[in-house]
Image (tube, coloured by chain):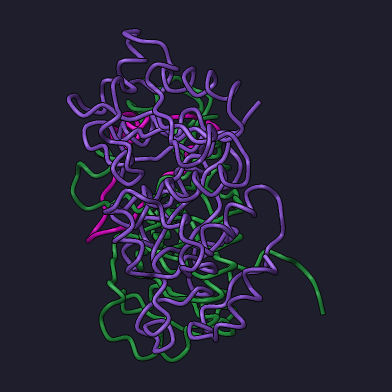
Chain colours: A purple, B green
Amino acid sequence: MGEAIVITSGKGGVGKTTTTANLGTALALQGKKVCLVDTDIGLRNLDLVLGLDNRIIYDLVDVVEGRCKIHQALVRDKRVDDKLFLLPAAQTTDKNAVTPEQMKSLVEELKREYDYILIDCPAGIEQGYKNAVAGADRAIVVTTPEISAVRDADRIIGLLEQESIEPPKLIINRIRKDLMKNGDALDINEITTHLSIDLLGIVIDSEDVISSSNKGEPIVMDPNSKASLGYRNIARRILGESVPLMSIEDHSKGMFKKLISIFSR
Amino acid sequence: MSKQLVHIKGTKEGLVLRLDDQCAYAELVEELERKVSEGSIDGKVDVQLHLGNRYLSNAQQEELIAIVQSPGNMHVSKVHSDVITIEESNERVLTEQRETYVGIVRSGQIIKADGDIVVIGDVNPNGKVEAGGSIFVLGNLRGIAHAGANGEKESIIVASHFEPTHVLIDNLIEVMSNEKPFVKENSDQIFAYINRDGIISYERLQEVRKIRPLLSTVKGGS
């Protein structure tokens, strides 16, 4: 029996979809069977980030309305051998095409076959959010060190606490070392004390993330990126390992140290 | 009629009308009308109505007040009754209760209480605590606090870290983005209350004892 994790944020553009794609890939690289579910019906783009957009035949709404079997709609990611699958969202309809009950039974069905089901939640707190949260056992809240993102994360945590799921965990995405040092961005401590939930991990802002997303290759495939390390650490924490929080400081470490850190992982 | 249904007594504060609580209401009205019309008082006088163990509806109370005030020189300052309905008593119990909320009041959440409320946790920006009585936050107050929401002007708002966006007491509202040098300099352990001039003001926690002595309910101590 697998575990369903919803990845949400409230605010848009903080990196829910990127996080879902990367955590999914990282978990699959660790040998887990992972299914990603895009619930952003009408505005799907998880398939693009994974580079699977041209292989979609059926989608989530087709499955829910019984036009196809669940396994027919799943798109396999060939790069991670038989471990990573995507259930894409429909693009031609809207979020009201699915009900929370339907989502719940769909996720239940997926849980029988997969170790992890990552649900990519749309922005907002309306129907799409309710659908995404319906089947989840755990929740991950993504935020960035901006006051607007933190405010929305606070709201969404409040809503998640009303649900009968485990207390949500936090990922702080797009950390800019320079801004944080100057005090121009909120620092990690400030955010965690304000939201007062457990920190699951941090991801350093990197241009590679954007370029790799555009290429349809999740950044975790590239072991040399600092952002990739952040996602890999989070994946290991999800699996129950205790990994110390990476430092945001040593951005310019030498080749030798880099090698050590790769081997010591 | 042998028994007097309306006793009139003079006190320093004015007249006290003690109304019999055993007779029929109609009889009482009749007697009261007679008593009031035959009285000859110079100038204005305050009158207190003592109803004893008789329960009157609001409409009946108003009728009695109207009768007393009809000659024009008497004014009813207070109606005193020894009985209340179960409903009123329940309401009173609720408003005197002190409720406790454990957790964080997050953005968009509203926590309400009929009486006082103790929040063990923070109140985050955009979160709101609304109480009929006073609000005590054992954490950071960074959201909105509305004390005395049902008109209790004696209510206060206390927080161990006092940095709200809005402070409301009774129907007064204060937006904290305005310059408040006192609050800015001493954001720890202060409280808000309505002062004698009827405006919201702020004071160190140590002053509560002086400003709201009735808040203390523990008897004794040395």
Residue A158 vs A253, above or below: the answer is above
Name the residue nearer the viewer: B101 or B19. Answer: B101
- Residue A85, can we see it? yes
- Residue span colored magenta: B39-64
What percent of the width, then of the height, locates residue B134?
50, 61
Quarter of the image with the C terminus of chain A is: bottom right
**B219 left or right of B83 in image:** right
- Residue B119, can we see it? no
Residue B128 occupies which quadrant of the picture? bottom left
Residue B201 on the magenta span:
no
Residue B221 occupies which quadrant of the picture? bottom right
**B186 left or right of B176 in image:** right
Q: Residue furthest top?
A: A66
What percent of the width, then of the height, locates residue A89?
30, 29
What percent of the width, then of the height, locates residue A192?
53, 67
Quarter of the image with the N terminus of chain A is: top right
Residue A208 occupies which quadrant of the picture? bottom left
The number of callouts visible is 0
Give me the residue at 46% from left, 65% from top.
Answer: A227
Residue B49 on the magenta span:
yes
**A182 left or right of A171 in image:** left
Name the residue nearer the viewer: B29 or B82. Answer: B82
Residue A115 vs A198, above or below: the answer is above
Q: Residue furthest right?
A: B222
Name the residue nearer the viewer: A160 or B125. Answer: A160
Give me the residue at 31% from left, 22% from top.
Answer: A59
Residue B23 vs A126, above or below: the answer is above
Name the residue nearer the viewer: B159 or A235. Answer: A235
Give me the residue at 24% from left, 38% from top.
Answer: B66
What percent of the width, then of the height, locates residue A207?
32, 69
Give me the residue at 49% from left, 46% from top.
Answer: A25
